[in-house]
Image (cartoon, grey):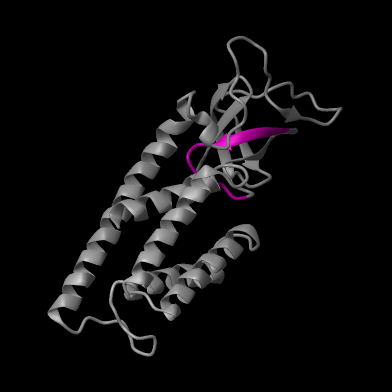
Amino acid sequence: MGVLVMLALLGVYIEFNTPGIGLPGLVAVICFAIIIGSKYLVGLANWVEVALFAIGILLLLIEIFVLPGFGIAGILGIMCILAGLFGMLIKNPPDKLPWPQTQFDWQLFTNGVLGLSIGFAGFVILAGLLAKYLPKLQFLSGLILVPTVAKQGDEFEVSMTVPPESKTVGVNVGDLGEVVSKLRPTGKVQFGDAVVDCVAEAEFLDKGTKVKIMEIHGNRVVVKAVEN
């Protein structure tokens, strides 16, 4: 259970950082299907709990792809997912609340909570390592949505647009700017008159966030949020 939960969450995390639907998303779907299917087959999950979990996933997708920011839909989605998973740890009919009644029920519940906790802890650790090191590894950098990494030499230039009358000819490390389109983790940042394609350093940044250029490698401009 712990391994399946960890792989499912990692798949979702990587999928949200990559364009389109790919292998990480497929792995997440398979892991969730195994978790829910196995619980249903052994009688731990009933149709109410499966429906709650599915509704939670749907609400999260709406929050991510349709609604701006993080609000009621996202909170309700997380609550439905947690309620569905909690109910699947205990065998109960759909018309009764999932709560351990016997010593065996408590043992199943304890083992389930332990598995979920281990899986979540493993996900947090691995997600942190991926966010920190994955973009820096050339043979794995394709798994993260970032601008094309420059080759050796001057084959690429920073992707930048400026008005004809502007005197801005480039950007440098340390320049301050403002996000004009959400960085997830790539997007556009305005530095003076110039609008530059940038990538956030291991985070998503909303429009209007003040940022600072931390690194420039060819056409890859890395920015980080700064205090106003």
Whether residue 213 appears in magenta in the rendering, the answer is no
Can you give x and y, in whole percent of width and height, for residue 13 in the image?
47, 48
Query: Hey, which quadrant is residue 41 in on the image?
Result: bottom left
In the rendered picture of this protein, how many numbered marks are placed on residues?
0
Left or right of 132 on screen, residue 20: right
Q: Is residue 49 left or right of residue 109?
A: right
> Which residue is found at the position 41% from the left and 35% from the top?
132
Q: Residue furthest top?
A: 153
**Position above or below: 178 against 106:** above
Q: Position of residue 73 (x, y in %)?
A: 55, 70
In the figure, residue 96 lies in which quadrant?
Answer: bottom left
Task: Name the foreground residue: 174 vs 30.
Answer: 30
Residue 199 lies within the magenta run: yes
Q: Is residue 153 visible?
A: yes
Q: Is residue 228 visible?
A: no
Q: Is residue 89 above or below residue 219?
A: below
Nearest the eye: 78 or 195: 78
Residue lying furthest bottom: 95
Where's the N terminus, which quadrant? bottom left
Q: Position of residue 129 (x, y in %)?
A: 37, 37
The span shown in magenta is 195-206
State the residue lying farthest toward the right. 164
**In percent of the image, x 53 and y 36: which residue is there?**
144
Q: Position of residue 93 (x, y in %)?
A: 34, 86
Q: Is residue 22 above or below residue 50?
A: above
Which residue in the rendered view is the most extreme toward the left? 103
User: In percent of the image, x 20 and y 77: which residue is there?
Assistant: 105
Viewer-proximal residue, 124 or 49?
A: 49
